[in-house]
Image: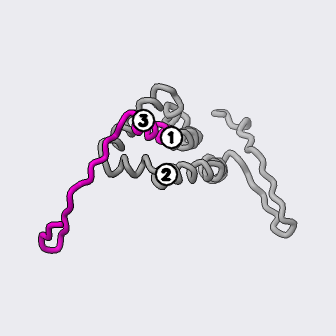
């Protein structure tokens, strides 16, 4: 290691991104893309709806894969078991929570009544048919 004052430098380790690793990274990014694309399209189908279209999804996944594979350090992190996969698992685990939050607090398409004493909850879809724009 060379010492340049307070800054340490060291050689960058090489990590070759072969076709198999690139395919693994692309698959991981696709897995991460699905809950985000589906959830955002619920918020605003007009603006985020295209995220669910095959061409848009493929183009975004391909572009992000190129970005990840462009950095040996990021590619190595994404390709190893402790890298990207735990974050994807977390996104899938939290997807139902995100969808409920969107329906209840953002789009307000459901109404929730909680009886804390009885420990019961009633969820009803809002009826927008009385509005002319519905």
Q: Which residues are magenta?
A: 1-30
Whether residue 102 is visible: no
List x then y, in percent, for residue 75: 36, 46
Q: Mark 2, mark 1: which one is toward the viewer?
A: 2
Q: Which mark is residue 81?
A: 2
Q: Position of residue 119 (x, y in %)?
A: 83, 65
Residue 99 is inside the magenta segment: no
The numbered mark, 2 or 3, whose residue comes first in the sequence reads 3
Q: Residue furthest right?
A: 118
Residue 4: image x %, image y %?
Answer: 12, 69
Foreground of the two, 31 or 95: 31
Q: Residue at x 41, y 39 (%)?
A: 21
Q: Quadrant of residue 133?
A: top right
Distance from disc 3 to disc 1, alpha carbons, whole Å, reads 20 Å
Q: Secondary structure at mark 2?
A: loop
Q: Name the secondary structure under disc 3.
A: helix
The residue drawn where x is 12% and y is 73% is 5
Q: Are marks 2 and 1 in contact (CB under 8 Å)?
A: no
Closer to the camera in the image, 63 or 124? 63
Q: Nearer the viewer, residue 36 or 12?
A: 12
Residue underneath mark 1 = 33
Q: CA distance from mark 2 to mark 1?
A: 18 Å
The image shows residue 111, relative to residue 50, as above or below, that is: below
Who's the residue at 73% across and 37% down the image? 130
The answer to if 4 sits in the magenta stretch is: yes
């Amino acid at each position: 290691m060379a010492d340049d004052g307070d800054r340490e430098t060291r050689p960058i380790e090489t990590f070759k991104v072969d076709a198999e690793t690139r395919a693994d990274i692309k698959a991981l990014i696709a897995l991460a893309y699905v809950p985000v694309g589906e959830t955002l399209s619920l918020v605003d189908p007009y603006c985020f709806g295209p995220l669910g279209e095959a061409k848009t999804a493929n183009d975004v996944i391909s572009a992000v894969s190129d970005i990840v594979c462009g950095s040996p350090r990021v590619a190595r992190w994404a390709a190893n078991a402790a890298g990207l996969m735990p974050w994807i698992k977390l996104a899938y685990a939290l997807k139902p929570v995100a969808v409920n939050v969107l329906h209840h607090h953002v789009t307000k398409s459901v109404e929730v009544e909680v009886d804390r004493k009885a420990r019961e909850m009633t969820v009803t879809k809002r009826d927008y048919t009385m509005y002319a724009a519905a």
